[in-house]
C-alpha cells in the first residue's frame, strides 16, 4: 500500500513534479483538499494490498458485510441508504456556457451558478474523512482510444468499485503523466440527503462534480459521467462516438466472428445479450459468443473505413434481479467470487439472493430487515453486482485489443409491449440514425421515478448525452461520408407482449436466432420483406427450430401494423420538432418520407 500522504502535503511524485504534467493534478488535489478539508489524503495505486486494506476498513465500519465464504469467496454485501438506490436524472445537470449546447434533452445550469451551488455543499464535507485520489484509465491502458481521468472521493465503496470497473492506479497515473490531459471528477457522499444531491457536468472544462449519492451511476464517475456524458462531448469534437452500447462477438461454425454493438436503455437487456449462451442446437453446431463489453462502447473509424470499438470499462455493474442459471449463466458464473453486491437480499446461510435467481426463500431483505413479501421484493429491483470482466467465462480474447474490434452491425432496441416487431433492418445509414433517434422504451428501476412509462430515449442516450441531441444526431449522420464502410443498423424488441400480458418472444439465448439473421443480412445471405419501416424477416427467414410460437406471437413478432406505425410516426415528428431550428433537416425529411409511404 502506498503510504497515505497526510494533509496538507498532497503531492504525488515529490518535488520533481514542478512544471511536469503532474503539477496540474497536484494543484487540483490541493485545491480540493482546501475546500473539503479531509483528515487525510490517500493516493490510490490500485494494488492488491491497497484493495485488501480498503475491504478491511469497510468491514470494520459496517459498510461492507461479508457473504458466505464457502459459496462466495471474497464477496461482499453493501446496503445503501434506502433513498439512494438509482440514478437521479432530475438532479443531473449539463453545465455548458450556452444553454442551447446542452439542449432540451438535458437539465442545464450556468457553469458559474452550478460551481457555486455545489462547491457550497463540498465546503468542509470531508472533515474527519479520508480523501481518496483515484487515477483511472477508461479503456485498455495501451489503447489510443482510451482516455484517463482522476476521481477524488471520500467513499471507500466508490474506490473499491472503481478498482473493479476501471484500470485504476499506477499505470493510469503514468499515462496521465505522459499525456497531461485527464478528466477531473470530484465526488462526496455528503449527507446522502436527496434534497442535497447534484450530479453536475462541465464538458467545456472536462470536469464532473457529484455530491450526495453513493449509487454507482451517480458516484463511479468513470462510468456514466465520464465515459458517456463527458466522452460524448469530446467524441463529437474529435470525430468518434461514445455510446450506451454492449459489444458482443458472434462466432459462427466456420470460425468467423462478427462484432455487434447494441444500445438498449438501462435494464433493457444489454448485459444479458453481451453474455448470451447459444441454444443447445447452436452450441452443438459450433456457435460461440464472446463478451467484449456490457454497457459502454467507444468507437471510431479505422483506416479501412469500418468502425472499431473498445469497451472503456474493466468490469460489469450488472442488474441482479432476473439473473439466473437459466437467463444468464455467464453472469452467474462470473459472480461466484470476488464480487461486490449492492442492495440484494440474503438467505439463511448468508448467500446473496434476488428475485428470479432460484426457488429459495431469503431471510433478510435489501434493507437488512426480516423478509416480508408484503413489503415488496426482497432484493431492490435495481440491486447490482460489481465484478471484473475477466471473471466472465465468455470474456473475449480480443476485449483488450488496443485497436478495438470491427463492428458489423449496430442494434437499437427498447421495451415496447406493443406495435414494435421483433426485428427490422434500416434501409441505410440515414434511416438507421432516424431509427435510433426515434427509439422509445418503457422506463425501468435503473433511474428514480415511475416505471413502465413509454418515453423517447434516442440511442438509449437520453440520460447520458453530454450535449444537444440535435447536434448529436448531426454528428451520427456525419459518419456517412466517402471512404466510410459503416455497419448495418437494426432495431429489436425482446419485450413485445401478448393479450395476456406475457412476453411473446422467449428472449435470452434465443436472441441469437435474431443475431444470426442480422449477420446473414450483413453478408447478403438472409431474406427479408421490405416495408415502410424497414426490412422485416418473415418467421421462415429465422431459424426457429425448437421454438414454439403461438399464431398470435408470429403475427405480432413478424407483422407490420400500418395504422399503428402511422400514429407512431406522428409522435416521432412531434419529438423531432422539440429541437427547433437546431435540428438539421435530414432526419425530419427522412421522417416525412416514411410517413408518406405509411399513408
Ligand atoms: P441492462 O441493464 O441493459 O444491462 O439489462 P440486463 O441485461 O441486466 O437485463 C435487465 C432485465 O431485463 C433483467 O431482469 C433481465 O432478466 C431482463 N432481460 C434481459 N434480456 C431479456 C430478454 O431477452 N427477454 C426478456 N423477457 N427479459 C430480458
Ligand atoms: P445498465 O447500467 O444500463 O446496465 O442498467 C447502469 C445504468 O444505466 O444506470
Ligand atoms: Mn447503462
Ligand atoms: Mn447492464
Image (cartoon, grey):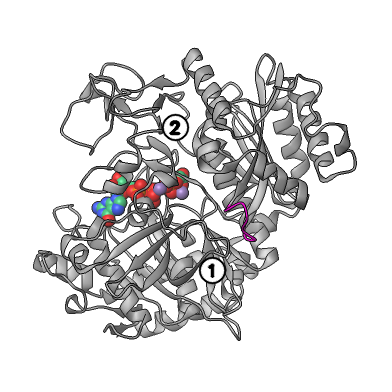
Q: Is-magenta flag for residue 498?
A: no
Q: Residues within 10 Å of mark 1 (few under 14, many from 20)?
A: many
Where does label 2 land, which residue? 85
Tell whether circle 2 marks a residue whose Cβ is less than 8 angstroms from ligand 2: no
* Nearer to us in this view, 286 or 459: 286
Q: Main secondary structure of the magenta part?
A: loop
Give the image location of residue 274, x and y in percent: 37, 56
Q: Is residue 277 left or right of residue 187?
A: left
- Comes first in the chain, label 1 or label 2: 2
Examine the image and state in which quarter residue 75 appears.
top left
Q: Residue furthest right?
A: 19
Q: In the image, is residue 566 above or below residue 2?
A: below
Give the image location of residue 139, x and y in percent: 57, 53
- Does any portion of residue 443 appear in the rendered image? no
Residue at the (56%, 38%) spot, across then down:
220
Where does label 1 land, which residue? 308
Residue bounds of the magenta highlight: 139-145
Do the residues under discs 1 and 2 have CB atoms within 8 angstroms?
no
Tell whether circle 1 marks a residue whose Cβ is less than 8 angstroms from ligand 3: no
User: Quarter of the image containing the C terminus?
Assistant: bottom left
Q: Is residue 279 left or right of residue 492?
A: left
- Does any portion of residue 129 appear in the rendered image? yes
Residue at the (33%, 39%) spot, across then down:
320
Q: In the image, is residue 253 above or below residue 203?
A: below
Give the image location of residue 288, x and y in percent: 30, 63
Amino acid at each position: 500500500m502506498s503510504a497515505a500522504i497526510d494533509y496538507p502535503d498532497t503531492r504525488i511524485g515529490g518535488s520533481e513534479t514542478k512544471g511536469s504534467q503532474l503539477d496540474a493534478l497536484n494543484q487540483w488535489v490541493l485545491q480540493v483538499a482546501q475546500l473539503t478539508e479531509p483528515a487525510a489524503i490517500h493516493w490510490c495505486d490500485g494494488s492488491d494490498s491497497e484493495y485488501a486494506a480498503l475491504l478491511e476498513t469497510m468491514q470494520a465500519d459496517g459498510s461492507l458485510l461479508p457473504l458466505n465464504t464457502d459459496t462466495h469467496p471474497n464477496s461482499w454485501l453493501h446496503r445503501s441508504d434506502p433513498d439512494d438506490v438509482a440514478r437521479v436524472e432530475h438532479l443531473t445537470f449539463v453545465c455548458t456556457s450556452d444553454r442551447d449546447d446542452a439542449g432540451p434533452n438535458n437539465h442545464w445550469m450556468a457553469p458559474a451558478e452550478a460551481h457555486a451551488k455545489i462547491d457550497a455543499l463540498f465546503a468542509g464535507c470531508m472533515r474527519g474523512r479520508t480523501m481518496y485520489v483515484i487515477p483511472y484509465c477508461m479503456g485498455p491502458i495501451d489503447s489510443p482510444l482510451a482516455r484517463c481521468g482522476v476521481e477524488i472521493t471520500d467513499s471507500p465503496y466508490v474506490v473499491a468499485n472503481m478498482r473493479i470497473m476501471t484500470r485504476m492506479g499506477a499505470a493510469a497515473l503514468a499515462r496521465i503523466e505522459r499525456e497531461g490531459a485527464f478528466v477531473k471528477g470530484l465526488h462526496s457522499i455528503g449527507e446522502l440527503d436527496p434534497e442535497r444531491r447534484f450530479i453536475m457536468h462541465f464538458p467545456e472544462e472536462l470536469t464532473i462534480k457529484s455530491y450526495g449519492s453513493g449509487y454507482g451511476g451517480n458516484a463511479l464517475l468513470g462510468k456514466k459521467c465520464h465515459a458517456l456524458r463527458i466522452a460524448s462531448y469530446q467524441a463529437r469534437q474529435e470525430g468518434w462516438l461514445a455510446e450506451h452500447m454492449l459489444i458482443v462477438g458472434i462466432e459462427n461454425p466456420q470460425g468467423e466472428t462478427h462484432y455487434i454493438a447494441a444500445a438498449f436503455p438501462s435494464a433493457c437487456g444489454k448485459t444479458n445479450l453481451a453474455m448470451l449462451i447459444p441454444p443447445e442446437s447452436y452450441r452443438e453446431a459450433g456457435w460461440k459468443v464472446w463478451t467484449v463489453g456490457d454497457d459502454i462502447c467507444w468507437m471510431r473509424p479505422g483506416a479501412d473505413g469500418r468502425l472499431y470499438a473498445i469497451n472503456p470499462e474493466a468490469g460489469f455493474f450488472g442488474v441482479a434481479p432476473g439473473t439466473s442459471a437459466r437467463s444468464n449463466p455467464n453472469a452467474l458464473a462470473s459472480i461466484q467470487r470476488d464480487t461486490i453486491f449492492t442492495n440484494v437480499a440474503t438467505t439463511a446461510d448468508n448467500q446473496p439472493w434476488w428475485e428470479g435467481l432460484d426457488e429459495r426463500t431469503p431471510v433478510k431483505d435489501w434493507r437488512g430487515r426480516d423478509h416480508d413479501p408484503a413489503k415488496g421484493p426482497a432484493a431492490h429491483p435495481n440491486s447490482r453486482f460489481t465484478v471484473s470482466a475477466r471473471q466472465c467465462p465468455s470474456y473475449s480474447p480480443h476485449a483488450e485489443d488496443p485497436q478495438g474490434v470491427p463492428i458489423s452491425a449496430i442494434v437499437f432496441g427498447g421495451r415496447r409491449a406493443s406495435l414494435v416487431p421483433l426485428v427490422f433492418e434500416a434501409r441505410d445509414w440515414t434511416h438507421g440514425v432516424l431509427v435510433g433517434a426515434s427509439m422509445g422504451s418503457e422506463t425501468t428501476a435503473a433511474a428514480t421515478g415511475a416505471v413502465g412509462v413509454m418515453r423517447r430515449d434516442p440511442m438509449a442516450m437520453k440520460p447520458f448525452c453530454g450535449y444537444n441531441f440535435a447536434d448529436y444526431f448531426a454528428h451520427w449522420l456525419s459518419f456517412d461520408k466517402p471512404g466510410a464502410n459503416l455497419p448495418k443498423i437494426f432495431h429489436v424488441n425482446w419485450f413485445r407482449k401478448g393479450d395476456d400480458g406475457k412476453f411473446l418472444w422467449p428472449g435470452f439465448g434465443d436472441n441469437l436466432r435474431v443475431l444470426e439473421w442480422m449477420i446473414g443480412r450483413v453478408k447478403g445471405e438472409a431474406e427479408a420483406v421490405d416495408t415502410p419501416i424497414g426490412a422485416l424477416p418473415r418467421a421462415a427467414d429465422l431459424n426457429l427450430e425448437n421454438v414454439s410460437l403461438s399464431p398470435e406471437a408470429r403475427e405480432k413478432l413478424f407483422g407490420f401494423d400500418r395504422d399503428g406505425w402511422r400514429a407512431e410516426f406522428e409522435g416521432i415528428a412531434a419529438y423531432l420538432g422539440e429541437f427547433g431550428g437546431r435540428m438539421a433537416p435530414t432526419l425530419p425529411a427522412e421522417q416525412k418520407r416514411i410517413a408518406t409511404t405509411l399513408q
